[in-house]
Image: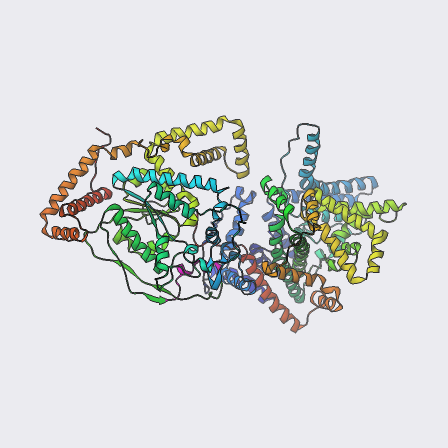
């Protein structure tokens, strides 16, 4: 179940909140847990048992780890707990990828390929595996005490607002809120407004742009395509003119931001309606003046996770040599690239980001400072746009071919009338992406997102939210409704 | 306010639970998602969830106004709706067309259905040959097969077509199936009624629209004139007298749904600008001597305007409509062509009307001719045996089976289903290879049932019955008066008119099952 679906918006969400607020406070967590399990079981029925078993196992392992005084055993239990979380992630997410690569290598030596049944990727596994790791490590490091109740721990892992696509909530950030939280009526309302803002980002911007991007670059997941379909995409990319190529990659850059940030907004909004304060996930990433800044603003909870649970354990910047420091940085980005998807293009994407981060530390940051703020924002944005080619096109050869088309200087005249809906949506996306470059924009953002509303503001926000919600529902359903005059056979 | 939000969120559910005021429904047809069945298998493989989401998408409360609202927004701001992207092309002066109609005009349509003009020519020639074969097999039975091609909007009103829709570059192949089949039918002598030609002749003189500006089919009013032409053609073909169509006084009115069918697909809140159209009621004269033949129409959606407007029961004894040779309308006994015994149906029918507009010619009459020829020339046991042989040859080819096994696994079908589909595809692609009788210019081989129908015995039986009826008619002075009138009207001798009437009386009795010939073999 995804948030931008009828079943969630018109059935699950209303029924959930009705029952949630009717129930007494002390049983609300149980109901939230039950609803979250239903939510997950709807989308991943074959994985729900794995999830529950792994969560229970982790809970008791961490409790045991916390109680034991023996450092060796403590370390072992911590390792087992992390191995369960990361092992599941590795098996489900990287099993197919690994086997394909092993078989490719075997193929070079004319050896028989290993038999392997393809595994389906359970939704949200990349997110809840990480949350599970934060729980284990935060407890191990004595940052927090472990949960007393299994149900509370399970709720932390499977809570439906952030289960599918984050934000990755660290255990230490939310432990107290699970045990005790308050939801004021202003939280409920402002949570709803935030949810609607996210829905608009997803439905009115990302989906509109995404549809057009798919027309040019094919569906985002090449795994499901047949050889003929892949050949068709390759042909399209090989013959695309530079104008269309630039439009497509700019469009995708906006699509991915509004899609992901929209989903995070919806998650944060849903959480706030229940009294949770989830961490922010995006902070206007496209106004960054350097790549390092971009990664501090983009998918912030993930960056924090990588910093705390990978970069620091590797030694961070407190290492003996400069080379090691840069390697740590680069390696973290390589892993984060792989986290985005099990394919070589994501590895290249991560590696490139790592290279730019290192370049930032070495010279690029100073260069950007000399450029001035606005030029450096657009320079950084251009780097992001170009590296996105490796993110969107799931084959390195095709990504490279696409980049060559970008710089083939084979431009065709641009006509706004060819696709006004796309271009207007891209302009809107660009406006909101760079809105906070101005002080006025920042002020408006603070007012909308982070300030408590007075009565008049509530009324305006409420009316606007309802209209926007209705409009999103229309867009969601109209896009799939394409009838025929009569049936044809 | 949060409570009010809750109420608003529940509005959709409440709308479905209680019969709250309804909004204007959405137009057009979509594949309706059946209510999903929950069981362990459907849940665990995710099909229940997918189907439920699809079902709710089609059945949530206030769906209609929400979709119309969004479409109107897209229309007003960007001049498009989700439908207009793929199914509508905007012409000049507010005229709209279906894209394949535009492609047909620019002679590029058939390259979406065949690799090149040569291949399409081969396919169309093959189909024309089959029509010719079928026509000549049926004729001795007093059964007439004809092709009737309705006009298409691009042919009658090309002046409103958009420019820059010619997708083929200079020097690239172009081909019009419409012109090709016309020549081919004329060459072979296939019965062919070109209503498009009639409409072109009418265009300059008619004081009404032959096609509506925002519809894709011929206008309701114009189709009545086409129906009149069709009846006259049948009379000529069968040398019979049918009831005459009487078109009543016309009135100018806002477009009926059928005259704005393409616009309806846009599902907007506000109507597109368009003129008013004429409408009239069609009746028939009271010619009691007229015969009512049975006609099967195998065709596309252009037939709807005729079958919905004409007093069909007064003109035809039966008039099943085999829509795209798939679903059957206007037949109480059958809903799908798969349920029909093709030989029985053919032998009890007088006219076969193959009614496809030029944009649908690539469908090759949806294989009616192939199936009919095979059914008329081969016995069911022979067909079964040939089919078995084909499937056997598929199963013996290990490489072929490997491919089919892969297909079965990707399509989630059993291997038997996939093999059977492969066999159907082969027969469809190479009918003459597997059923060699079809190679003859007019196949002389007949299925036993057909042969029996054809025997001298059966003919003499019918002849005897006709003689009996002639005697009965002669004995009735009242009937003889009407026959004399008919003879004068159609410039026939009284004996010929008497015989024709008697022939149809007997034929009708056979069709209704009142008269039966029980012989089954040739003596």
Residue B109 lies in the magenta stretch = no
Q: Which color scheme does this rendered protein use?
A: rainbow
Q: Position of residue B200 (x, y in %)?
A: 37, 56
Give B58 or B518, whichever is nearer the viewer. Answer: B518
Give A448 or B172, whichever is nearer the viewer. Answer: B172
- Where, by quadrant of the figure, is residue A110 drawn? top right
Magenta stretch, main secondary structure, is: helix
In the visual, does A172 lie left or right of A454?
right
Above-or-below relation of B28 to A314: below
User: Residue A148: in sight, yes or no?
Assistant: no
Give B155 or B429, whichever is nearer the viewer. Answer: B155
- Where, by quadrant of the figure, is residue A13 drawn? bottom right
- Total number of numbered labels? 0
User: Residue A244: in sight, yes or no?
Assistant: yes
Residue B256 lies in the magenta stretch = yes
Q: Position of residue A191 (x, y in %)?
A: 66, 62
Extreme-right residue of the structure? A320
Give A80 or A181, whichever is nearer the viewer. Answer: A80
Q: Residue at x 72, y 56 (%)?
A: A281
* Magenta segment: B253-266
């Amino acid at each position: 179940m995804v948030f931008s679906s009828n079943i969630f918006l018109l059935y699950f969400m209303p029924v959930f909140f009705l029952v949630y607020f009717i129930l007494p406070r002390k049983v609300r967590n149980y109901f939230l847990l039950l609803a979250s399990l239903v939510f997950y079981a709807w989308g991943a029925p074959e994985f729900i048992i794995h999830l529950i078993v792994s969560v229970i196992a982790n809970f008791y392992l961490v409790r045991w780890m916390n109680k034991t005084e023996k450092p060796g055993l403590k370390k072992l239990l911590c390792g087992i707990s992390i191995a369960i979380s990361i092992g599941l992630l590795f098996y489900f997410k990287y099993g197919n990828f690994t086997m394909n690569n092993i078989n490719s290598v075997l193929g070079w030596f004319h050896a028989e390929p290993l038999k392997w049944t393809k595994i389906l990727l359970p939704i949200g596994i990349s997110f809840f595996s990480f949350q599970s790791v934060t729980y284990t490590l935060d407890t191990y490091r004595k940052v927090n005490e472990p949960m007393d109740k299994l149900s509370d721990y399970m709720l932390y892992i499977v809570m439906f607002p952030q289960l599918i696509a984050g934000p990755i909530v660290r255990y230490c950030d939310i432990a107290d809120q699970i045990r005790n939280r308050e939801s004021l009526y202003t939280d409920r309302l402002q949570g709803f407004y935030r949810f609607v803002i996210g829905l608009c980002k997803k439905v009115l911007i990302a989906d509109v742009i995404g549809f057009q991007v798919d027309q040019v670059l094919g569906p985002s997941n090449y795994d499901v395509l047949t050889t003929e379909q892949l050949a068709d995409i390759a042909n399209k990319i090989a013959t695309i003119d530079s104008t269309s190529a630039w439009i497509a990659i700019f469009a995708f850059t906006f699509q991915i931001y509004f899609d992901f940030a929209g989903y995070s907004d919806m998650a944060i909004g849903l959480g706030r309606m229940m009294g949770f304060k989830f961490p922010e996930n995006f902070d206007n990433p496209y106004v960054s003046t350097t790549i390092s800044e971009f990664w501090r603003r983009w998918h912030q909870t993930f960056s924090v996770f990588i910093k705390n649970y990978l970069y620091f354990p590797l030694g961070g910047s407190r290492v003996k040599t400069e080379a090691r420091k840069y390697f740590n940085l680069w390696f973290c980005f390589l892993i984060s690239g792989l986290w985005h998807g099990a394919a070589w293009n994501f590895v290249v994407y991560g590696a490139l980001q790592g290279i730019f981060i290192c370049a930032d530390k070495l010279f690029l940051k100073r260069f950007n400072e000399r450029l001035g703020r606005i030029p450096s924002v657009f320079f950084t944005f251009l780097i992001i746009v170009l590296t996105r080619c490796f993110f969107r096109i799931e084959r390195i050869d095709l990504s490279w071919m696409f980049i060559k088309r970008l710089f083939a200087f084979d431009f065709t005249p641009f006509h706004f009338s060819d696709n006004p809906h796309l271009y207007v949506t891209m302009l809107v996306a660009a406006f909101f992406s760079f809105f906070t470059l101005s002080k006025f924009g920042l002020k408006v953002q603070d007012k909308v997102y982070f300030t408590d509303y007075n009565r008049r503001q509530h009324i305006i926000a409420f009316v606007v939210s309802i209209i926007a919600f209705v409009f999103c529902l229309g867009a969601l359903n109209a896009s799939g409704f394409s009838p025929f005059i009569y049936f044809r056979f | 306010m949060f409570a009010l939000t809750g109420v608003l969120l529940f509005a959709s559910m409440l709308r479905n639970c209680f019969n709250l005021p309804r909004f204007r429904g959405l137009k057009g047809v979509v594949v309706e998602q059946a209510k999903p069945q929950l069981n362990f298998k459907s849940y665990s493989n995710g099909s229940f969830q997918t189907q439920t989401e699809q079902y709710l998408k089609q059945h949530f409360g206030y769906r209609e106004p929400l979709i119309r609202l969004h479409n109107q927004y897209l229309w007003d701001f960007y001049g498009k709706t989700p439908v207009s992207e793929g199914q509508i092309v905007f012409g000049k002066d507010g005229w709209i067309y279906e894209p394949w109609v535009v492609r047909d005009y620019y002679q590029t349509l058939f390259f979406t259905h065949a690799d090149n003009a040569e291949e399409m020519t081969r396919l169309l020639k093959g189909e024309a040959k089959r029509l010719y074969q079928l026509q000549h097999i049926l004729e001795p039975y007093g059964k007439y097969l004809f092709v009737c091609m309705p006009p298409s909007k691009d042919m009658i009103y090309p002046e409103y077509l958009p420019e820059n829709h010619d997708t083929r570059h200079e020097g690239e192949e172009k081909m019009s199936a419409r012109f090709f089949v016309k020549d081919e039918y004329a060459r072979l002598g296939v019965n062919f009624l070109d209503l498009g030609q009639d409409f072109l002749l009418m265009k300059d003189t008619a004081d009404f629209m032959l096609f509506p500006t925002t519809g894709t089919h011929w206008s309701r009013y114009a189709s009545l004139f086409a129906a009149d032409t069709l009846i006259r053609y049948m009379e000529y073909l069968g040398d019979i007298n049918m009831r005459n169509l009487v078109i009543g006084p016309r009135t100018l009115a806002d477009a009926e749904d059928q005259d704005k069918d393409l616009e309806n697909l846009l599902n907007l809140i506000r109507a597109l600008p368009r003129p008013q159209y004429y409408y009239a009621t069609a009746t028939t004269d009271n010619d009691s001597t007229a015969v009512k033949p049975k006609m099967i129409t195998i065709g596309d959606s252009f037939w709807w305007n005729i079958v919905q407007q004409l007093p069909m029961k007064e003109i035809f004894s039966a008039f099943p409509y085999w829509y795209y040779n798939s679903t059957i309308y206007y037949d109480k006994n059958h809903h799908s062509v798969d349920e029909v015994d093709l030989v029985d149906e053919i032998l009890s029918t007088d006219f076969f009307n193959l009614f496809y507009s030029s944009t649908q010619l690539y469908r090759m009459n949806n294989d009616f001719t192939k199936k009919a020829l095979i059914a008329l020339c081969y016995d069911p046991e022979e067909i079964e045996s040939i089919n078995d042989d084909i499937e056997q040859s598929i199963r013996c080819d290990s490489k072929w089976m490997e491919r089919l096994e892969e297909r079965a696994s990707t399509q989630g079908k059993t291997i038997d289903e996939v093999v059977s589909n492969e066999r159907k595809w082969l027969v469809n692609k190479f009918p003459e290879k597997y059923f060699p009788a079809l190679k003859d210019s007019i196949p002389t081989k007949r299925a036993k049932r057909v042969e029996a129908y054809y025997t001298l015995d059966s003919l003499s039986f019918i002849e005897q019955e006709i003689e009996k009826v002639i005697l009965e008619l002669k004995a009735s002075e009242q009937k003889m008066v009407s026959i004399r009138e008919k003879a004068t009207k159609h410039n026939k001798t009284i004996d010929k008119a008497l015989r024709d009437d008697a022939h149809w009386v007997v034929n009708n009795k056979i069709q209704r099952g009142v008269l039966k010939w029980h012989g089954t073999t040739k003596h």
